[in-house]
Each structure stands twice: as C-alpha cells, then as structure tokens.
Image: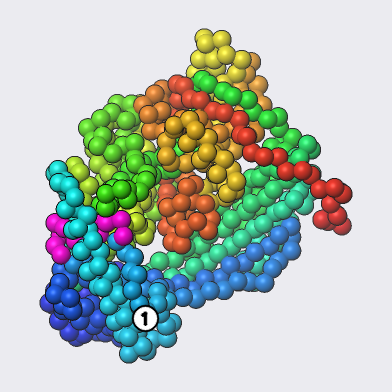
C-alpha cells in the first residue's frame, strides 16, 4: 500500500520531518540520508554553494540458482548497498554536469560506493558525509573546467543543464515475499535437463535470480522515497555444435516482480521442450543467404523490435562540453532534432505508460514508481499518427521537450542519467487478421518474382547474445556507415516459398537497419503480443556490460515491412572437438 509523507516534509530542516505514521522515523537508513542531504546543502568550502543535492541508495539481497544439463551448482548470494550521491554547483542554467570530465574526481577521496548493510545511524551518516563531500569537490572541479572550455567558443541557443520536477514523497512497506529456494533449485535442474537429448549439445544452463531489493532517495527539493525494487529473472540458454564446426544457440527468459509471477511448472516444461526442439532444428538448418525484400515480423518479434530500436533512439544523449581538440564520439540518435517529422505510417502511434502495472493479467516489467532522479513517470505519447511528438526524458533538458517525464532509469554519462523506456505500447488504427499478413506476403513475393519471402518469429533475446556476435555486427555496421546502435539479430527466421512451404534458416543479421525502415510498414496484425526483457544500457543489453539493470516491456502487433536488407553472419567458425563428447544421460 502506498504511503505519503506528511506535508510538513516540505521544510526538510530536521529529522522529525519523517513522521512515525509513515514508518519513516524508524527507518535508520532514511534518517541518515535526510540528515546528510540537509548538511550537504550548506557546503561552501570553495566559495561555491550547491544549488541541488540528491542521494540515492540501491540495496539488494540476491540469490542465483544455476543448473547445467540437469546438474545443480552451489547457490550464489550477494547482499549490498550502494550509495549514489550527486551535488550540483552553479545554477540550473549552467552547472557541473554535461562536461567531458563530469563525475570524475582525480584527487584523494575517502569514501566508497558500498555502504554498511547494518542499520547503524552514525556509520551510515559517515558514509554519506564522505560520499557527498567527494561529489561536491568533483562538482567544483568540473564546473571550473567546463567554464574554461566554454570560453573557447560561443554556444548558440545552449540548453540549461537542469530542470525542475515535482516533489515526490513515497514511503512504502518493504516486506519481502517468500522465496522457496529448494523448489526453484529443482525447477532449474529439471529445465536444463530437457536439453540432454539434443544432438551435439554443448551446454544448457538454467539460471534463476531473485533480487529482493529496495530503492531509497532524497533530495534538497524535499523529495523522499522508499520503494521496493524487486525482480525475478529466469533464463534458459543452450548451445549445440554444428556438423562442420561452430555452434548455434537458443534461449528464453522470463521476468516478474516476484517468483510467484513466473510461469508454473507445466508451462516452463513446455517452453523448455519447445526451445530444445527449436535448437535442434537450428543446428540442422541451412545457412542463410543475403536477402532483400518484404519481411513479416510476427507479434512477439515485432514487440521486441520496437522495444530495442525505439527504446534506444528515443533516449537522447546530449553532446558534452569539451576543450578544443578533446571531442569524444557520442552515439547520436537518428531521431534527434526530428520532432514533427513522420517516423511511422500515419495509422500508427507509440506511447510509453510506465504507470501501468499489468497487461492482460500479466505483470509488466516496465512498471516503476520513480526513476533514479526521484521523478514519477507520466504516460507520454511519443509518436502520434506517425509523427514524432516527444522523447524519453530525464531532468537534463532536451530540445523541444519541456520537463522530465520520469525516464531517467539508468546511470548515464557526463554527470547525467540515461533515459530508458518502461512500458511501450504500439497502437495501430488499421489492422488485419494475422493470417492475412502472411497471405499478403505471399502475394508480394509472387508479384516481385522473388523465390521466397522472410518470416521472423523470434529475435535473439537481449542479454543472451554472445559478445563475439555483437562485435562482428558492430564492425559490419561501422564499415557500411549504418546506425551507431546495435540491435538483436533474427533468431528464428523462415523462408516462405510461393507454395506456402516454410524453411528455417540460421545466421541472418540486419544490414543498415534503423528507424527509417519503420516508415515503410505496410500492415499490422490484429493480435498484439507482449515482450519483456532487462536493459542495462549496453548494446543488446549484453550481460555483464552494465552494472545496473531495469525491467522493460513492449506490446505490439505483427508487422509487415515492405523492404528490408539482411546479410548472412560472418562469425568465425570454431573447430569442433577432436573426440566425441561423453554421454550426458544414462
């Protein structure tokens, strides 16, 4: 149940502003945070006073259960608290962020990101004191260098560095749901065992991670927040060898706010068996050849496509201020400065509503109470009737959009937060039954005289792709001058022949793919599907490439594209083992 702090919190002058009725007064961690934010607001050690101070704490109690080919490993446990202090000096029009060196301090510091897991008031206050002290010194150092860099040239129509946001005061109950570790350990073991019969199986890992965390936040604008931040993540990934060397992999993942929201045993067994069968089919499938022509994305693949492409492209990263000759390459969105332009067909719209908790009875991974800047998300229409109307924004101003819409969900670069979507909803005013889309694809390939069309049923999962595949894709895009963003590749792609026959192929990658392709969508299906994943800001959300993850959701119908280019993968082929594998089952 949501609880709000009393209106007296607006003064934020002493610890008694955390009323006992909201249980905030009994929360030692929250009391320590508020006390040190109040003190840090008075820092004037270098003659520059802070105009804004914020402090976030991310705590989690994680357990990861892993099994491989039916054999369980020892559980991995991690418990931590990380502080995220920020001190802004100068003014909202020009402060210490947005500079090439923002957030980096080269002097001596005595603090640590990690703080004690024990609720001892003075130990916590000491940690926050040192963290805020370094943040202040970092800000003073950065703003001086930034002002010096700006003296080299005159910036035209330069945007401010910070913008106001409504105060948010939420203190919620933090009781954790029960977690049956023994039961989930047996589930992961059984799921990985489903792959033992796959010919040429190399690995099959099932991993269940339960993160029972909380997020605390307070700032000098009197926002105080304490909310649960929990995620149950179940992954299944398997790899099989190819007859002529190399390997192919397949995987699935499930996300829920707690373990009870994950599929039951019968559904998990069905998915594992289907994934094993698809992996066997992929290993036996022929290699794809270059293709150019119409492509049909079934609903599940279309939902992921929108999430990955527009989730990145609608997050604008401003170029930082730098000294002359020290410019750094910054990935630029293809949608930057395109407000008012057509980016989708006139009968399609796209909105983000991170306040929506579920869709068709399924909890949405993209629901959250506030972002990392203490801003509550608001529903936002990003694309209306094909026209770009807004971006996913943080408290760093973006040209053409007023205020933050609460999407500063990831640690960002140059002293600012990174924007990411929550729940994306693709809405089509004109739809046809999904079966008609396939029929229309058949008609198009016959009219164009093509030997076959392409149907994509599933994309590679974000966070499951291999690092070598992403590196190879990045190099190809750089050579071809394509988008600076990397997207997951098709995983289950089928040739659709004029007689209706289908053939699975493997190893396709997008060529010169980006937002421009979405303007040529010909038709949408009538039955939308939900896709959920975790994002960490890295290309294709590659596991381990980011230290902070958030849940994301996307709902979209099947989509028929008029013309797309895809190339075969050019991954290096590893030599097969020299001797046959040992038996993996009795």
Residue located 74% across and 63% down the image: 71
Residue closer to the observer: 468 or 292: 468
Query: What x and y, as percent, mark residue 443?
Result: 52, 14
Residue closer to the observer: 128 or 251: 128
Query: What x and y, as percent, mark residue 234?
Result: 57, 58
Under circle 1, the secondary element is loop
Q: Is residue 165 above or below residue 338?
A: below
User: What colouring method underlies this structural image?
Assistant: rainbow
Q: Is residue 216 visible?
A: no
Q: Is residue 182 left or right of residue 258?
A: right
Query: What span is colored magenta in the figure?
Result: 90-101
Q: Quadrant of the C terminus?
A: bottom right
Q: Is residue 122 left or right of residue 40?
A: right
Residue located 21% across and 63% down the image: 143
Query: What x and y, as percent, mark residue 573?
Result: 71, 40
Q: Is residue 482 left or right of residue 368?
A: right
Residue hosting label 1: 110
Q: Quadrant of residue 373?
A: bottom left
Specify whether residue 476 is painted magenta. no
Q: Is residue 252 above or below residue 138?
A: above
Q: Is residue 247 left or right of residue 50?
A: right
Q: Quadrant of the N terminus?
A: bottom left
> What predominant SS class does the magenta segment belong to?
loop
Query: What x and y, as percent, mark residue 346?
Result: 29, 26
Residue located 35% across and 70% down the image: 106
How packed is label 1: few (under 14 Cα within 10 Å), some, or many (20 or more)?
few
Q: Is residue 389 visible?
A: yes
Q: Quadrant of residue 167?
A: bottom left
């Amino acid at each position: 149940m949501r609880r709000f702090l009393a209106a007296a919190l607006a003064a934020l002058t002493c610890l008694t502003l955390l009323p006992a009725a909201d249980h905030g007064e009994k929360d030692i961690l929250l009391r320590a945070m508020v006390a040190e934010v109040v003190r840090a607001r008075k820092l004037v050690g270098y003659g520059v006073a802070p105009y804004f101070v914020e402090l976030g704490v991310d705590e989690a109690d994680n357990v990861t259960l892993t099994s491989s080919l039916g054999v369980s490993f020892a559980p991995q446990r991690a418990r931590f608290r990380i502080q995220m202090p920020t001190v802004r000096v100068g003014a909202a029009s020009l402060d210490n962020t947005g500079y090439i060196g923002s957030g980096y301090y080269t002097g001596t510091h005595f603090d640590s990101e990690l703080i004690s897991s024990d609720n001892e008031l003075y130990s916590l206050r000491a940690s926050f004191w040192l963290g805020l002290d370094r943040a202040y010194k970092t800000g003073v150092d950065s703003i001086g260098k930034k002002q010096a860099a700006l003296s080299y040239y005159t910036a035209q129509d330069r945007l401010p560095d910070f913008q106001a946001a409504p105060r948010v005061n939420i203190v919620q109950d933090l009781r954790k749901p029960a977690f049956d570790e023994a039961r989930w350990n047996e589930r992961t073991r059984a799921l990985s065992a489903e792959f033992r019969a796959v010919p040429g199986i190399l690995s099959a890992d099932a991993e269940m991670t339960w993160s029972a965390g909380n997020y605390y936040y307070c700032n000098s604008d009197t926002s105080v927040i304490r909310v649960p931040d929990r995620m149950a993540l179940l992954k299944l990934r398997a790899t099989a060898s190819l007859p002529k060397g190399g390997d192919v992999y397949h995987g699935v993942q499930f996300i829920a706010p707690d373990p009870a929201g994950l599929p039951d045993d019968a559904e998990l067994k069905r998915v594992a068996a289907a994934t094993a069968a698809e992996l066997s089919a992929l290993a036996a499938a022929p290699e794809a050849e270059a293709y150019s022509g119409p492509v049909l994305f079934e609903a599940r693949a279309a939902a992921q496509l929108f999430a990955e492409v527009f989730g990145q492209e609608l997050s604008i990263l401003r170029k930082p201020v730098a000294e002359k000759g020290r410019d750094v390459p910054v990935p630029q969105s293809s949608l930057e400065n395109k407000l008012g332009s057509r980016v989708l067909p006139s009968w399609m719209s796209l909105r983000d509503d991170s306040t929506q908790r579920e869709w068709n009875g399924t909890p949405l991974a993209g629901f959250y109470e506030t972002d990392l800047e203490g801003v509550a998300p608001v529903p936002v229409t990003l694309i209306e009737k094909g026209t770009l109307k807004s971006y996913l924004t943080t408290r760093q101003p973006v040209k053409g959009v007023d205020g933050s819409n609460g999407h500063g969900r990831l640690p960002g670069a140059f002293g600012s937060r990174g924007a990411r979507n929550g729940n994306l909803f693709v809405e089509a005013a004109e739809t046809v039954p999904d079966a008609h889309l396939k029929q229309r694809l058949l008609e198009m390939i016959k009219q164009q005289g093509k030997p076959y069309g392409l149907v994509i049923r599933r994309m590679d999962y974000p966070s499951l792709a291999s690092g070598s595949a992403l590196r190879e894709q990045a190099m190809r895009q750089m050579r071809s001058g394509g988008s600076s963003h990397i997207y997951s590749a098709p995983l289950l792609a089928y040739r659709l022949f004029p007689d209706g026959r289908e053939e699975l192929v493997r190893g396709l990658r997008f060529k010169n793919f980006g937002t421009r392709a979405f303007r040529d969508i010909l038709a949408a299906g009538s039955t939308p599907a939900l896709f959920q994943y975790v994002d960490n800001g890295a290309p294709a959300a590659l596991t381990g490439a980011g230290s902070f993850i958030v849940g994301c959701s996307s709902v979209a119908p099947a989509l028929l594209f008029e013309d797309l280019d895809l190339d075969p993968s050019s991954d290096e082929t590893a030599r097969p083992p020299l001797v046959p594998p040992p038996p993996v089952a009795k």
